[in-house]
Image (tube, rainbow, N blue to C red):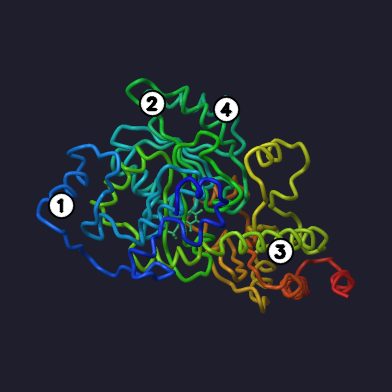
Amino acid sequence: MDEKIAKKLHPETLMMGYGYKPELSEGALKAPIFQTSTFVFKSAEEGKEFFELAYGQREKGPTEEIGLIYSRINNPDVEILENRLAVLDGAEEAAGFESGMAAISTVLLEFLKPGDLLLHSRPLYGGTDHFITHVLTRYGINVLPFTANDSADDIRMKVKNSGLANKLSMIYLETPGNPTCAMIDLEMCVQLAKEFSTKERRVVTAVDNTFLGPLWQHPLKFGIDLVIYSATKYIGGHSDVVAGSCAGKAQLVKRIKTLRTFLGNMADAWTAWLLMRSLETLKVRMDCQARNAEVIAGFLQRHPMVERIYYAGLLKEGCSQDVIFKKQCTNAGAMLTFDIKGGRNEAYKFLNSLKVIHLAVSLGGTESLAEHPGTMTHIDVDPEERRALGISDKMVRLSVGIENVEDLIWDLDQALAAASVKSTVGSKPQSILEHSS
Ligand SMILES: *Cc1c(COP(=O)(O)O)cnc(C)c1O
């Protein structure tokens, strides 16, 4: 497709064919799966030219494309996928990975070295938290967490008090945070990165945008350098593929791709093909999931067995979290966390009583899932820390799918009723029956 036309079109339109030329593949409407490890050069001279570019030995000519060499370096399916992922985030370039953790670990390793300081938000995805706390520190990288409760001044003080302000190299964020949906102000972090940058050392900012992106939160527009995904979640969307990605300025993504080549954790042709197929329905899926989540949030808010809901769509008008949400997100998304009345027993009874919603970790797929963060996804978080973050035994996390919302509400209602039976001392089971009638 002509780049001029492409610029005028919406991302959801471009997801059908952008970056793919049927005439290069026997006219096939859809990109074939280029299941090949290596590519044949037309001549020895061409092979030399491709390698010179791939290894950065000379600059690319004005119309020159990096040629196909070997599938650890590049592959047509992966390149088309990357073009489409870049479109979704308004990025110059994107990189596909074999998992979200592959994308996250590669980005952190590329921009940090021994002695450096990494400033990061908390809570983080469990795997990311583990990689930062237990792996990066093994290589002499200093790490400093902050939470959504910290103001810009609090964070400035933390960095200064660490004695390593002149070593700050990266700010890594996850917002909304999992599982509490706590919001971190992206603009505030971009400002902090600027303040701590020097001529020789530019502080790089990266955001794990898995929960609301690439539809409802576009961190690059707020000046963030890199946006990262577990494409296993909404981008893949069918709970049948593990993948990841990272997008941003070409200059930074090129560095990430170079490290990817040597770590060997790039997405393969089959993964890229599955994700391309998923991207065609990304918008309809996510819109439907978010609509369902909104209805479910309303239902849960009125339910006597529900003590508290963590969902951006129900934040108190004008509170600081709401201000951040309205500034940087366009939808509350389809992740819903709530505290059930009672404790672990009630939470487990609820989870064990679900009939439509599956009891499983992961999120973002077409089917609804429920889990218990305290003893599942966040079991590895230090217990004291877990309490401070508000991840208690009565907390349940839902990933809302595209099923008929009435069926989901029926299921939630009967599971909440089952959880309430003879468990909360002094509660009246009739109130549940009244509700469900
Ligand atoms: C699942 C997830 C990851 C890890 O991604 P994988 O594809 O499982 O490696 C990272 N961040 C968030 C927010 C996630 O939900």
Query: Horizontal and vertical percent for residue 331?
Result: 67, 50
| Residue 199 sits above or below residue 234 on the image | above
Q: Which residue is mark 4?
A: 152
Q: Amino acid at mark 1?
A: Glu
Q: Determine the CA span between mark 2 and mark 3.
A: 46 Å
Of helix, strand and loop, which one carries label 1?
Answer: helix
SS under mark 4: helix
Residue carrying label 3: 292
Residue sitting at x 23%, y 66%:
37
Amino acid at dot 4: Ala
Mark 4 vs mark 3, CA separation in Å: 35 Å
Label 1 or label 2, whichever lies nearer to me, is 1
Question: Seen in the image, is 404 located left or right of residue 118?
Answer: right
Residue type at the position of mark 3: Asn
Residue at mark 1: 46
Specify whether tag 3 is near ligand 1 (CB below 8 Å): no
Ligand 1 has an atom within 8 Å of the beta carbon of the residue at disc 2: no
Contact flag, marks 1 and 4 (Cβ < 8 Å): no
Taking the spot 67% from the left edge, 68% from the top edge, the residue there is: 345
Tell me: residue 171, above or below residue 299. Answer: above
